[in-house]
Image (spheres, rainbow, N blue to C red):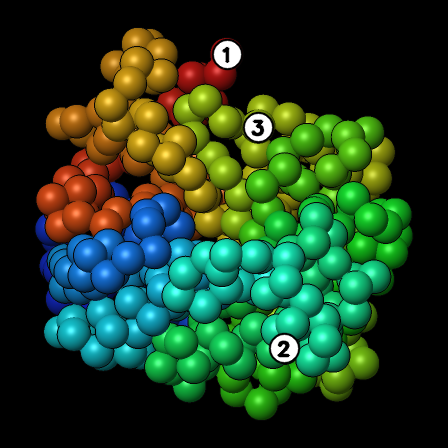
Amino acid sequence: MATTRGTWAYRDRFGDRFGRTYFRRFGPGVCSSIGIGTYLGDPTDEVDDRYEAALATALDHGINHVDTAVNYRHGRSERVVGRALERASVDRDAVVVATKGGFVPFDGDRPADPAAYVRERFVETGLVDPSDLARGCHCIAPNFVEAMLDRSLSNLGVDAVDCYYVHNPETQLEIRDREAVYDRLEAAFERLERRRAAGDLYGYGVATWEAFRVSADHEKHLSLPEILARAEAAADRVGNDDSGFLAVQLPFNVVMADAFTVDSQPTPDGDGRTSVLERAHEAGVHVVASASLAQGDLAVGEGMPSEIDAALAGDTRAQRAINFARSAPGVTTALVGASRTTHVEENVAAGTFDPLGARTFDAVFR
């Protein structure tokens, strides 16, 4: 598990190489404000090898926040992260490792009959009740979430993870009402609180795609304050002094800035609405930005408006897009998927530039 001593020693290793606020507080220590993701890519040995080299390069050169999920590339991404942790010249306690559970994972590749695979491996074994499945592939029932945590620990080859996300809980809104989804989350959080007390994870959160970026009347909307209240209730039942809810993950980039521009969440006094970035900041919850390059589009296309591009520091489009995401008030880390060492090197170099200040960032949207 990442520790105060390990992560601060990692930061000190790089001296003044990086720009202002490149390393930011997270959990017990600090993490890089640029992280590496492992979502994209075919489930092949060739891509595994590229990811392993890219991850090791990232860890050796200033990125100590790694994000994955039990279902990414059919379990291969977690296993590659584990191999990279062994290969890199950094200790485990210097690295923030985050993973997720919620989608039913395959094992190594996509089966010829996915529905039959889910039925035989998960339903008929009793791990998943059919009534808990959304889209035939998503479940956040406590037993399933806990089983996926165990699978992730095995895949990664670690004793504990630093942040465990319940993955895209808004998917459950397709089969049950909002209150029932909150109940399911609370039950999952209670199981994670027990595992936190046992030392298997430092903290947990939710990784979302739409839930926090859409308005309150949207069918996929979830309330961050309600989710935090459910986490507190779960901690109370377990007997933990406080909730282990640590972070939310959501898409954020220059063409998907809803987390900053949409007032999706109630204010603490309940009299108004504010953005999820502001609400998370007020609650002391970290925000981890996914899709910082819009899955590569901002690195090669013309998606960045010229006036915003001109305000950002960086030698390449990708670097400026990364620096936009990590400049947003309340964002701790901007994740960037990278399965090639050349891309990692370019991404790390983005951190040598200072991010925008809060006032300058605000001015971009005026």
Q: Name the kind of residue labelled 2 in the image.
A: Glu
Q: Quadrant of residue 266?
A: top right
- Residue on which the image places disc 2: 146
Q: Earlier in the sequence, mark 2 or mark 1?
A: 2
Query: In this rendering, which labeled residue sits more in front, label 2 or label 1?
Result: 2
- Residue sitting at 70 percent across and 48 percent down? 135
Q: Name the kind of residue labelled 1 in the image.
A: Arg
- Residue on which the image places disc 1: 366
234 sits left or right of 365 in the view:
right
For the N terminus, the quadrant is bottom left
- Residue sitting at 56 percent across and 57 percent down? 113
Answer yes or no: do the residues labelled 2 and 3 have beta carbons within 8 Å? no
Q: Earlier in the sequence, mark 1 or mark 3?
A: 3
Q: Is residue 118 above or below residue 196?
A: above
- Residue on which the image places disc 3: 258
The span from disc 2 to disc 1 (Cα, nearest Å) is 45 Å
- Residue sitting at 39 percent across and 50 percent down? 39
Query: How many numbered marks are there?
Result: 3
244 sits left or right of 37 in the view:
right
The span from disc 1 to disc 3 (Cα, nearest Å) is 15 Å
Q: Quadrant of residue 298?
A: top left
User: Where's residue 252, x and y in %?
Assistant: 47, 35
Answer yes or no: do the residues labelled 2 and 1 have beta carbons within 8 Å? no
Between 78 and 35, the residue placed more toward the observer is 78
Query: In this rendering, which labeled residue sits more in front, label 2 or label 3?
Result: 2
